[in-house]
Amino acid sequence: MNDRLSLAPDAARQLATTTKTTPQMRGITPRYLLRALPWVDVESGVYRVNRRRTFILGDDRISCYSEGGTNRVVPEDLRELPFLRDADAALLAELAGSFEQMTFEPGQIIGAEGETCDKLTVIVSGRAEKRVTGRYGEDALLEVIGDGQFFCLDSWTRCQPLPFRVKAVTSGVALTVGLDALNALADRDAGLRAALDAHIAGEAPLPGSEVPVDLASGHTGEPELPGTYVEYEDTPREYHMTLAQTVLRVHTRVSDLYNAPMDQTRVQADLTIQALRERQEAMILNHPEFGLFNNVAPGQRVQPRTGAPTPDDLDELLSRVWKQPSFFLAHPKAIAAFGRECTRRGVPPVIDTRFGSPLITWRGVPLLPSDKVRFQGAGGAATTEILLMRVGEAEQGVIGLRPAGVPDEVEPGLSMRNMGTDQKAITSYLLSAYFNAAVLVEDALAVLQNVEVSKYHDYS
């Protein structure tokens, strides 16, 4: 006997059913990039981007490495200099060995305006500003340069005065090489001398520029009109479908006995598809070959003025992708850092509803968060990047690619194929997501690099 006057809840629960959720998954994100990209159905599995012929373009960075505490230039990356594009590897190695290391501190003048530039300077680490005296004597900022960037190629090869001064913003390390080292190599190699002389004379085309179309305008009378044609690239880039795959296994006992009220195979497949889509977004951003962060053209890379992402920095990005910019893409921490800088300046960004969520916008362009945007470094010194893009095939922007149709398709570009049941009574399903992304024209992408997200302000 006990002193209870009614049935205990624990006992009553044995006669009750329960309301269940589908399995929840912490790794699911909004995947704004996949939702915002316009997707093109590719019939053949290959998407070719035909462009006007352009002159060879590198990534405007000279890579360096550390060996025994000493920083050195990667010899092959010296081909970023136009006149060294076809130089012999032995010459590049010899020139790389001529670089000397120097350190600099915040506020130090690395290159003085008006002084003869007899050295090429490569920033190994750190950040510096190119500044110039304006028309009326004012101090003007031209550009912020960072890791791997160099100055000033034209002044160095011509041994002319530096047209700007370079002032260090942070402490860092640089490598320098004198013009005499380059001339010594050119005196021994006729091909290098010819390429160098053509560069000095201004005969070489600007890297990245398109082959011109001859036109006439503003004329009167009956002058002879120029004849012309538009040259195409000989080897246009082709994008093949890449994929993310896995094999889902479900025991027949589970699918036979425990299939109500939820289909066990369907629930397992749904969660696996979510994981495949998360991987798809990460690869579109970070894959070394076709990832968007690795396909930003040299002139489209911007360094932040102070490290933290400011309205000025995003305005600079907008000046690079000014033709119908669609959206920024950034890590949530970078968006939070941008919000702090806006608050500090008293210009809170406008909030707009996109994709059913309130999102920060700047100049009407939304900042889409994604945890797939990579961080470099560790701890409080970690830096990230902010991407701005124009999207759409008609707009010559960034597009997503997927096959027009695949067998056993359960979602666009994603198939779930039954592979049969083995002798252990386990049914296997092959899940495959096929996709890629293409940048149709270089100015469809711009990136703000080395963005610091650990800067806070005291408003007390």
Image (spheres, grey):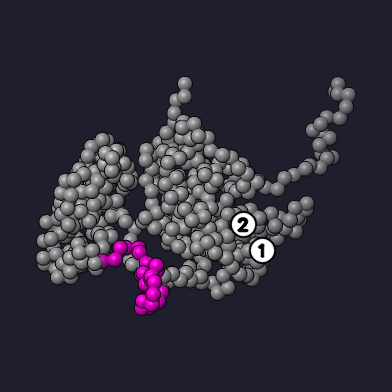
The image shows residue 353 at horizontal and vertical percentages of 63, 44
Q: Earlier in the sequence, mark 1 or mark 2?
A: 2
Q: Which residue is drawn at 40% across and 36% down?
A: 380
What element does badge 1 sit on?
strand
Extreme-right residue of the structure: 5
Q: Is residue 416 left or right of residue 438?
A: right
Q: In this view, does 225 lie to the left or right of 158?
A: right
Q: Residue 273 carries which label?
A: 2
Residue 92 image-quadrant placement: bottom left
Q: Which amino acid does label 2 sit on?
A: Ile
Q: Residue 410 carries which label?
A: 1
Distance from disc 1 to disc 2, alpha carbons, whole Å, reads 10 Å
Q: Which residue is drawn at 81% across and 42% down?
A: 17
Asked whether residue 75 appears in the rendered view, the answer is: yes
Q: Nearer the viewer, residue 77 or 226?
A: 226
The image shows residue 172 at horizontal and vertical percentages of 27, 41
